[in-house]
Amino acid sequence: MPDRNDGADLGEGPLHGIVVIDLSTTLPGAQATQFLADAGADVVLVEPPGGSPLRADPGWPGLLRGKRSITLDLRDDTDRVTLDGLLAGADVAVATMRPAAAARLGFTAEELAVRYPRLVAALITGWGTRGPWADRKGYEALILAKSGVLHSKHQLTTGPDPAHVTTPYASFAAAQAAVHGILAALLEREESGLGQLVESDLVTGVGAYDPYNWFYELVLGRYPDAFRPAGAAFDQQGRPQAKLLYALLIAATADGTWLQFAQTAPRLMRAWLDELDLNAELTDPKWEGFPLLPTPELRFEWWNKMISKVGERTLKEWEEAFARDPDVFGEQFRTPDEALDHPQLVHEGRSVVVDDPDLGPVRQPSTLVHAAGRPLTRIRRAPRPGEHTRELRAFARAATPPNSAAQQGRCDPPLAGVTVLELGAMYAGPYGATLLADLGARIIKVEPLDGDLIRMIMAFPEAGGAKVLQGKESIAVDLRSPEGLEILRQLAGRADVVLQCYRAGAAARIGVDETSLKSVNPDLVYVNAPGYGIDGPYGSKPAYAPSIGAASGVSVTDAQVVGRPAADRDQLLSQARRLYAGGTVPAVQSDGMAALGVASALLLGIYAKRRGTELTGIVATMLGTSTQALIAHNTSYPGRPARSRVDSDFRGTGALYRMYPASDGWVFLAAPKEKEWAPLVAALGFPGDLVEERFATGRARATHEDALADVLAKVFATRTKAEWEADLTAWDVGCVAVTQEPAERHMQGDEFYAAGYAVDAVSPVFDEHRRLAPLNRFSRSTTKAEAGCTVGQHTDALLRELGYDEARIAGLRDAGVVR
């Protein structure tokens, strides 16, 4: 099995020859440059004396892998000259700092354009560089708290209070958005010869995860009487309120393995109930209306009945059932470490072991993107601090000073002129293409005559698909007909990229696989974005966000349910509720993670092609991308330090990184660093309990963690959350009022709209409305922020573009080939 990293020569990678200077000190920068290093770029990690702060993360061997390290003290004039030489010889620079710090370093669009006119510089911030919160500290939890994500996770607790989670949703999103911006700017540089500054931020990034609730909340706000909101999945007594709980059942086997089912289509639910031997019972008038049962008591009874039925069989017996009936499938819940043992990941070589001379064998995910049936490159170990200082100083001295800057005015979107043909349904793959539409690509979405299923996933027509359809042209065509398939082949002949998101084998059966379409257009970039893979033991399995969350470790990381299911029935049901909240909250889930990875794969394929590198069999899977998002959690080695865990109340990971009740709600305090203690105490007014000897040092505070939390709780309870946010922020202490409404509603509200995280668009269904802003801002290139489209809205126009006349189009419509 391809688990180790010592197989065949994997080549230099599509980004070979691209030099990246990594000035980042936080997770999103590390993950962005890790992607670039995995693709073959020469990433130079600039570390301060004593090493990068990232080395305090237990996952640092995965985050820093494949990079070279130089130690520089940027307060020293000589080392600043060295940095200048590094940047002069580089193609890309990445930094994670607040705008004021970036300006002090000269990391601004204006100064970079003068000093390094060909440099593509990426700045990743917490809050962006222009809004009212731009200068605030950008800790992950602060973004999740203020955006509403922690509220959306509230069912991890027993009450309505927000819940803290440690999956790095915002950081991963900002990292992948930076990758998108970097690759798009490098593409634009191929034409203009000029670099530019690219920005991404954690706030806008986290908005990319939600597949449809943005428009659910829009409809509820605009048409409050249109339909009854679904509400929480469970009521305050822990009883089910949503019919989806039966389709997305979470239950434990007889031998103690948690399973996540995803029987979301009517056909799948019928098969599911047959397997549980419950279809006959539904004939009892007691269950009339299933799955919309009328009372909490009946819903709880049926839910409990299904859980009991699952618990009658062992894992082996259920696996036999899955093999017997492809319409029934349950995914095992795994920890991040256990996820790398997943049979599909092992089959694809997505789990590798790198030998480190100090740490021993280091296990970690392979590259996010695979090509030609293998990782992009051979994974190399992480460097020691300053390991390559001597050779990199020589590189800096030899760097050629750049030519004087050309005129750097505004220009078209960086992907203007790129055409992507999208074959797929629902969210993960298609939203990856949507992100390229924001960067200027033309996206032609090929839909069945009834449209993508996501259009009708909600009770309000078209609301379910409005986000994933943004900026696209829709052609509705029956690919089962010879005429329909011929239309698609003609479209492929004019496209630059094809994106397909079907299960393994489906594209070949239809006749739209890579070989078939490259016979029409040999220059195509062809990207596969399935749930599990294009082959292998799980390639044909249905992939839904909850299933991938269970398989990858995302659900367990959020829910903190580890080990065997509880023997006590009430505790077991509580665990099931927590696992559900861990993996099925729309605001942040594996569909969004996968979409971000799809966009990165598309852009990498396009840029590689532009550089003359032919990548075949490009694959980015939902499961593979989700394990990449957790690389700081699933990188393992002997003696790995323990990660900070969320406390049992889901308030935080320590007294100085957690939520506290204010007089009118909650605040999130983020002041974990030693240098943040004195400003915090001052901002709180020097309360006597905090200046005691037991809290005088970082070590003492760690020893008295619980006592410190108790003291802080008493202090924060004395004032409102808005007052605490204003006062602590004035002292440059990380603190926000925790939003207590759904993230998707809050992020399109006036406060976030004014801050630039949401923008206006005009839809044929929703007229003028607010949508999430593009994930990138460029100093020269523009972006687009368009709305969705209706089914087949562009069918006739596209057919005319292919040369079809009106009579022929009418004939195709009458024959049911197009809509």
Image (spheres, rainbow, N blue to C red):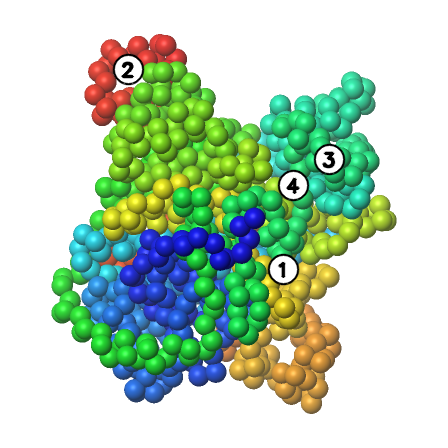
The reply to whether callout 3 and callout 1 are in contact (CB within 8 Å) is no
Name which residue lies at 23% across and 41% down. 417
How far apart marks 1 and 2 lie (CA) works out to 55 Å
Disc 3 versus disc 1: nearer the observer: 3
Residue hosting label 3: 318
Disc 2 versus disc 3: nearer the observer: 3
Q: Is residue 530 visible?
A: yes
* Picture quadrant where residue 752 is located: bottom left
Whichever of labels 3 and 4 marks the residue nearer the N terminus, that label is: 3
Q: Residues within 10 Å of mark 2 (few under 14, many from 20)?
A: some
Name which residue lies at 86% across and 49% down. 568
Residue hosting label 4: 331
Residue hosting label 1: 164
Is 57 drawn above or below residue 555 in the view shown?
A: below
Whichever of labels 4 and 2 marks the residue nearer the N terminus, that label is: 4
How far apart marks 4 and 2 lie (CA) works out to 45 Å
Badge 1 marks a residue whose secondary structure is: loop
| Amino acid type, callout 3 | Trp
The reply to whether callout 4 and callout 2 are in contact (CB within 8 Å) is no
Is 540 drawn above or below residue 156 in the view shown?
A: above
Name which residue lies at 61% across and 37% down. 229
How far apart marks 2 and 3 lie (CA) works out to 50 Å
| Amino acid type, callout 2 | Ile
Q: Residues within 10 Å of mark 4 (few under 14, many from 20)?
A: many
Whichever of labels 1 and 4 marks the residue nearer the N terminus, that label is: 1
| Amino acid type, callout 1 | His
- The disc placed on residue 809 is 2
How far apart marks 3 and 4 lie (CA) works out to 10 Å
Whichever of labels 1 and 2 marks the residue nearer the N terminus, that label is: 1
How far apart marks 1 and 4 lie (CA) works out to 25 Å
Disc 4 versus disc 2: nearer the observer: 4
